[in-house]
């Protein structure tokens, strides 16, 4: 018979930011307001730039960091 006690227990993996806090998955009302205002410069909320910013912010990045990353992606075209 085989001994199954050596199998590793599956643990839920939670991504953490630099401060050791769990990353957020939702955008605050204040940041959403900033995004909507900023989207006026980029042809609305459906633009590629804004979608990238939303993705980065849901990963836990701040508004400014998400903007920097989105600008870098825009420049790669």
Image (spheres, grey):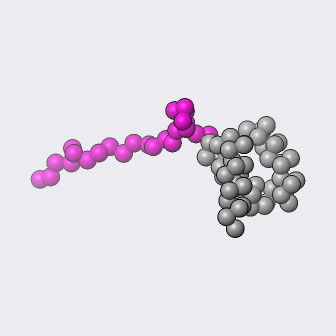
- From the viewer's perspective, tell me whether residue 54 is left or right of residue 13: right
- From the viewer's perspective, tell me whether residue 35 is left or right of residue 6: right
Q: Is residue 32 magenta?
A: no
Residue at the extreme bottom of the image, as rendered: 77
Residue at 76% across / 55% down in the picture? 50
Residue at 72% across / 49% down in the picture? 67
Q: Nearer the viewer, residue 19 or 32?
A: 19
Does the image show residue 54? no
Q: Position of residue 33 (x, y in %)?
A: 82, 42
Residue at 78% across / 61% down in the picture? 47
Q: Position of residue 59 (x, y in %)?
A: 61, 46
Q: Nearer the viewer, residue 7 or 61?
A: 61
Q: Is residue 17 above or below residue 72?
A: above
Q: Main secondary structure of the magenta part?
A: loop
Region in magenta = 1-26
Residue at 29% across / 45% down in the picture? 8
Q: Is residue 15 magenta?
A: yes
Q: Position of residue 46 (x, y in %)?
A: 79, 60
Q: Nearer the viewer, residue 2 or 15?
A: 15
Q: Nearer the viewer, residue 2 or 52?
A: 52
Q: Is residue 20 above or below residue 70?
A: above
- From the viewer's perspective, tell me whether residue 13 is left or right of residue 34: left
Within the image, what quadrant is residue 62 found in?
top right
Q: Position of residue 53 (x, y in %)?
A: 71, 51
Does the image show residue 31? yes
Residue at the extreme left of the image, as rendered: 1
């Amino acid at each position: 018979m085989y001994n199954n006690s050596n199998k590793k227990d599956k643990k839920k993996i939670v991504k953490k930011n630099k401060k050791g806090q769990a990353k957020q998955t939702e955008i605050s009302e204040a940041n959403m307001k900033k995004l909507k205002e900023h989207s006026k410069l980029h042809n609305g909320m459906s633009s590629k730039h804004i979608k990238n910013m939303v993705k980065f912010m849901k990963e836990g990045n701040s508004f400014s960091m998400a903007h920097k990353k989105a600008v870098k992606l825009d420049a790669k075209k």
